[in-house]
Image (cartoon, grey):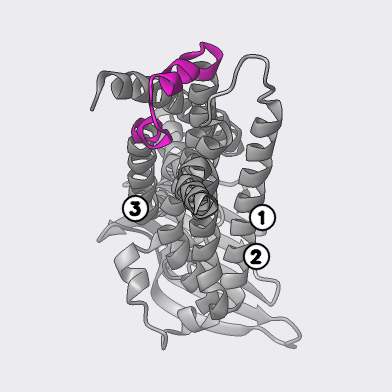
Amino acid sequence: MLLIDRYIFKIAASAFLVALGVLTAVIWLTQAMRDFDLMTTKGQSLIVFFHVTGLIIPSLLMVISPIALFIATLFALNKLNGDSELVVAASAGFSPFQLFRPFAALILAASIFSGFMSLWAMPWSFRQLRTAISEVQSDFLTRIVRPGAFNMLDYGLYFHYRERAPGGAMLGIFMLDRRDASQTNVYIAEKGVATKVDDQNLLVLQTGTIQRQDKGAEAPAMIVFDSYALDLSRFGPGADGTPLRPRERTTSELLHYDVSDPYVKLDEGHFRSELHERFVAPLYALAMGMIAFAALGAPRTTRQNRGMAIAGAVVAALVLRVGGFGASALMAREASAVPLAYALPLGGCVLAALYAFRFVFNRPFKRARAVFAAA
């Protein structure tokens, strides 16, 4: 890489890292405040709070990195032009392709980073988040919940136990689960012990009954048990005991999901959408970087207004990203929308490239016209 390439790359890469860090911090803070009850009502430490809320960062980075690249490219090109460096470089014979080289390196790096986040880091973090929520809920039941009090674990979910026995077992357990509008479950047990089996947090109830009242049924169904294990992940915030959601599955699992699985059949469109979104995500870094370069890549004098070019780039990037969200929603409903999801970022990238290098592409046509005119 030439000295001037390293200089331009340093400016753009520094702006990218700053934009990525600031945007991620701001959005993470707004999301983390929603889980502040981990410390206020569930008695967790600051370390647990940062661990749980920090697991959403990979998903934020996947979405934010193309936006940060767009901002960084605009900033770098505007700075270079404001200092008249683009004009000097163009006067010295620096072609648009040569100017694009350091930005191409940054765009490629950002695309690889976004792909790593979407294909590996994001599903890993969501699976870890599921486990962390389960552990928080287990800790909440075994150490924080007070005996003799009715505690609301989630909206429509209440837990009560009479007293704690030696060894940590809970005696006289009552649990009411009304989260499902079509069914009400009441768990009553003489004793309950929280335990962990194969990374799964369980509440083992002993000697009790389960009353299940379906909506519209005249009498509840009664189940008597000697021992019954409840998966505590069912009682975490937003957890409902379902199998791994699409976002919690690895990319390999999504590539080979079982269409005969009842859970997959119920929402196959979501599985399809999640899979293709992971592959489409890095393409938006290519498109965003190319749009920004197309807008400000041509040198301009200080008298020429660059505001319209920046506004046009912002509008184009916004339309492209909104269209991407729309294509994602369409994919969840129709498999025929899958090509559209890929065509949007790739088409945006190609159109931006044609516009950015339009003067270079026009030269052969101008020469040909000149030859025909002379003939």
Q: Are marks 2 and 3 in contact (CB under 8 Å)?
A: no
The one of 227 and 371 positioned closer to us in this rendering: 371
Q: Earlier in the sequence, mark 2 or mark 3?
A: 3
Q: What SS does tag 3 mark?
A: helix
Where does residue 166 sit, x and y in percent of width and height? 34, 46
The one of 221 and 286 positioned closer to us in this rendering: 286
Q: Which residue is mark 1?
A: 155
Task: Give the residues in magenta.
Answer: 81-102
Where does residue 265 sit, x and y in percent of width and height? 50, 84
Where does residue 50 sit, x and y in percent of width and height? 43, 32
Q: Which residue is mark 2?
A: 179
Q: What SS does tag 1 mark?
A: loop
Three-letter code, disc 1 = Tyr
- In the rendered view, tell whether residue 18 sits above or below residue 335: above
Q: CA distance from mark 3 to mark 1?
A: 27 Å
- In the rendered view, tell whether residue 290 sits above or below residue 162: above
The quarter of the rendered structure image containing the N terminus is top left
- 313 within the magenta span: no
For residue 251, side relative to residue 54 (left or right)? left
* Disc 2 packing (10 Å; few <14; some 14–19; many ≥20): some
Where does residue 306 sit, x and y in percent of width and height? 66, 25
Q: Which disc number belongs to residue 127? A: none
Q: Are marks 3 and 1 in contact (CB under 8 Å)?
A: no
* Disc 1 packing (10 Å; few <14; some 14–19; many ≥20): few
Specify the principal SS of the magenta part. helix
Q: Of tags 3 and 1, which is closer to the observer? A: 3
Q: Are marks 2 and 1 in contact (CB under 8 Å)?
A: yes
